[in-house]
Amino acid sequence: MNVMRALRRFLFLMCLLALLVGAGGYWLRANYIVPVMMYHHVLPSASRRADSVSPERFEMHMSFLRKGDYNVIGLDQLVAGLSSGRRFPFKTVAVTFDDGYQDNIDHALPVLRKHRIPAAFFVSPFKFGRVEEFAFMDWPQIKALQREGMIIGSHGLEQRYLPEITEREQETEIFDSKRLLEAELAQRIDFYAYPVGGFTDRVKAKIKAAGYLGAFTTNRGTDRFNRDVYEINRIRFSDRDDSEFILWAKLTGFYNLFREMKDPH
């Protein structure tokens, strides 16, 4: 009798465990967050800077995506899917670059081309052709990215931190950068990346009014599940991401749930 009771208890616990695993799997599938990879510099002398990756490490990252059968989608597919409530399958990712540095076209584009990976580049027209600490791309190079099928987005006219400037200056950064890029590239500019990830509710309203379909932050978005297409969180990648385990962990689709979120302002 005791044996039968123990067996029934064991079977009950196994059924309960199966239910919990099934429910957990369903929750994970229903709440998968497409990782949006964020890069800045691709530099031979990355020196483990927080905003830089070496060409060799970038090759490793993109090779990992291809070898791992990740589905790399464009921001147009991502934002359209999020807007319609689509559930993306596991191992769906997107790739983005901020600032428009010349090293992107020198060192990132050949790797993207090799692995047939689409990416988005957020650029600032008033920076084109300038050399500050680093050189920025110019119009011909931006158009070269465009011809390669890369998405071009706005990073403002000159990457000003939006929460700390006047509303009129915000409008200039948001509206005028879009108009200038569209006029020169003869295509719609649908996406905006907030410089340093900073935004406010009023800034978001201006982004919508300007006609952008989506906007991207860093880890300052208040929606950890990226359901709000005007504050999509992204994940920074750098030379410090030097193992396949780290890449796997950041690309699980649930990294946003566990990392520290910053004040959007």
Image (tube, rainbow, N blue to C red):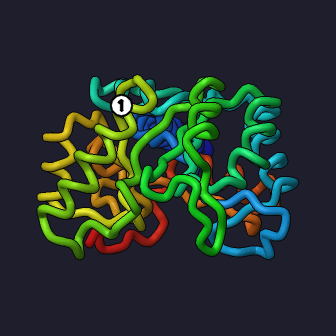
Which residue is rendered at x = 34% and y = 31% of the image? Answer: 82
Residue 189 found in image quarter = top left
Quarter of the image with the N terminus in it: top right
Which residue is located at x 62 percent, y 56 percent?
Answer: 101
Residue 103 in picture, x, y percent from top left: 72, 55
Q: Position of residue 253 (x, y in %)?
A: 53, 45
Q: Which of 214 and 102 is in front in this view?
A: 102
Q: In this view, does 131 lie to the left or right of 174?
A: right
Element assignment for label 1:
helix
Please tell me which residue lies in front, 128 or 259. 128
The residue nearer to you, when weighing 126 against 239, is: 126
| In this view, 14 is above or below 246 | above
Mark yes or no: residue 9 visible: no
**Most foreground residue, 3 or 61:** 61
Examine the rendered structure and indicate whether residue 112 appears above or below residue 221.
above
Residue 135, position as x, y percentages in the image: 65, 62
Residue closest to the far right: 56
Q: How crowded is mark 1: few (under 14 residues within 10 Å), some or many (20 or more)?
A: few
Q: In which quarter of the image is residue 212?
A: top left
Please state if 148 lies on the left or on the right of 6 as rendered: right
Give coordinates of residue 194: x percent, y percent: 36, 57
- Where residue 132 sits, quadrant-wise, is bottom right
Q: Can residue 241 be seen in this view?
A: yes
Q: Which amino acid does label 1 sit on?
A: Ala
Quarter placement of the C terminus: bottom left
* Residue lying at 44% horizontally and 53% vertically, measured from the top left: 124
Say whether residue 236 is left or right of residue 23: right
State the residue at coordinates (28%, 29%).
83
Looking at the image, residue 67 lies above or below residue 97 = above
Identify the residue position indicated by label 1 in the image.
Answer: 183
